[in-house]
Structure formats: structure tokens, C-alpha cells
Amino acid sequence: MSTQQITCPLCQHPERKLAASWAEWEDSLSRRPDGPMRLEAGRACGVAAMAPDLMECLACGSVGMSVIPNGEQLGQFYSHYHMTDGFVAKAGKKVARARKRLRLLSLIAPRAGNGQRRFLEIGASIGTAAEAARRMGFEAHAVEIDTDAIAKGKELFPQVQFIEGQVDDVPTDEPYQLLYGAEVIEHVPDPAAFLRACHARLDRNGLLFMTTPDCGHPRRPKALLDWHSVKPPEHINLFTKAGMKALLAANGFKRFWLPPHAKPGMRIIARKT
Ligand SMILES: [Zn+2]
């Protein structure tokens, strides 16, 4: 079964307005290079039959699907759609980019009592950020749902410890000092539950770092469907900073920083207290 979302799933405001209908979304696909693939994958997984609209929250301005696809539909969608080959080709560059980002995070992440630090990359694909963290002295773990990506990651980065599944599948017995989720939360059917699962796996004062598209960014294309980050059901929620802050605060993260960013992408650094 799929879940209809009336209230904003991010800030809980009771009213959202229509931002774009599913028919308008399908029409817009004729203008995109990835259009034919998206049209086919959306129909094959059964999401197109539900025709979910894109709704905009009247309070926080975030945009999300009016009907949340279920796990089976999302599994079907992703089985039509593999990005892993591109990730492998760019692996070296991605490790270097993650390393740059990790420099600041490494300075402010806490240490465990024994001086060690555990790092978990969420939605890791082949685990490039986990590998970057390992090279910086973290004990590196990566959780990923796609078995194909894990197989390639293990081959490229044999010292990263891979876990198959989602963040809920990561054991809670030993906490992490740093969680890293790049371009993940917009894919998640229940982002509140996702943040609670992250919170439960963090050490005291541990850090959660995330990136996600910024729906409220001044440089976002004015016409919603001209924005390349709009891609249901791959992206379920497109956050504004207001939507993100509300969701963080409601799910255990009272201290966070959303630094300014030149492009319509958001960076989030949240600390568990
Ligand atoms: Zn909202």
C-alpha cells in the first residue's frame, strides 16, 4: 500500500498546494535527456498508475510527492536504473572531493573514549566517502542497499566495512562519531524515521553531515519542472532550509548549521546532544 501525504512531512504544516501534477511531470520529460528512461521506469514500477502530484508546503515551501511510493515500487524503480558504472569511473575524483569535505568535519567530530573514531557512510554506493575517511584515520563503515554497488566497492576499497541494507539495518551496539549521507535524504520515503535512525547510531556529541538539493535556493530554476533535481519517485522530498530545520529539531537534532552554498544544494551539519 502507498501512503497519501496531506500534511507537510517535514514541518507538519497541515496545508500544501499543487506544485505540479504527475501529467505535467510526464510532459516535462520530453525536454530532458534522461526523460525516456524516467518515463519508462516510473511506469514499470507502478508509481505512474498512482499519478502522485508534487505538493508545495504553504509554510516551509518544501516540495514532496503527494503519495509516497512503497518499498516494492522503489525496489522496482531502482532495478531499472543503475548509476554504479558512472560512480566507478569517477571513484578517484569522488574520494578526493569527500576528503576535502571531511577536513572540517574531522576537526569537529568527537572521539570515543579509546581515542578511536567510527565513520558511517549512508547510501554509500561504492563507498568513496568511507574510503576518504579511512585514509584520514577513521574506522570506516558503509551501508548501501544495492548489492551490485557493494560488490564493486569491496573490490575497490577492501578496507571499508560494508553493510547491506538501510540505516535501520546498522547495529546500534557501537556508536559512530561521524555519519555522512550525501544526496540521500531526498530519496527516503520517511525522512523523519531516517533522522531518528541516524540519531540512534550516533555517539554523544556525534556529527551528522548531509547534502541534499535546496528547493528554496535563489538560484533554483523558477519553473519547478525545469529543475533537474525534480525527479519523482527517485526524489521524494525536496527540502527548503526551513523544512530541513523543522525536521531536524523534531527528531532529536537541536544543534545544526546549514552554511550558505553557491549552488541550489544544501549542506547540513547537525550535532547530537
Ligand atoms: Zn512544510
Image (spheres, rainbow, N blue to C red):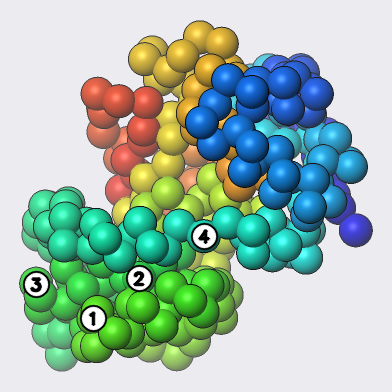
Estimate the spatial distance between the alpha carbons at disc 1 and disc 2, rounded to whole Å.
8 Å
Image spot of residue 266 (x, y percent): 36, 35
Considering every residue shown, the one lying at the far top of the view is 222
In the rendered structure, are the residues bearing label 1 and label 2 in contact, judged by CB atoms less than 8 Å apart? yes
**Reading the chain from its start, which is encountered first: label 4 or label 1?**
4
Disc number lying in front (3 or 4): 4
Instruction: Residue at 26%, 71% (x, y): give it.
Output: 130
Disc number lying in front (3 or 1): 1
Picture quadrant where residue 94 is located: bottom left
Task: Report if the beta carbon of the residue with label 1 is closer than 8 angstroms to ligand 1.
Answer: no
Estimate the spatial distance between the alpha carbons at disc 3 and disc 4, rounded to whole Å.
30 Å
**Reading the chain from its start, which is encountered first: label 3 or label 4?**
4
Instruction: Residue at 41%, 83% (x, y): give it.
Output: 151
Picture quadrant where residue 48 is located: top right
Q: Which mark is residue 136?
A: 3
**Reading the chain from its start, which is encountered first: label 2 or label 3?**
2
The residue under label 1 is: 157
The residue under label 2 is: 126
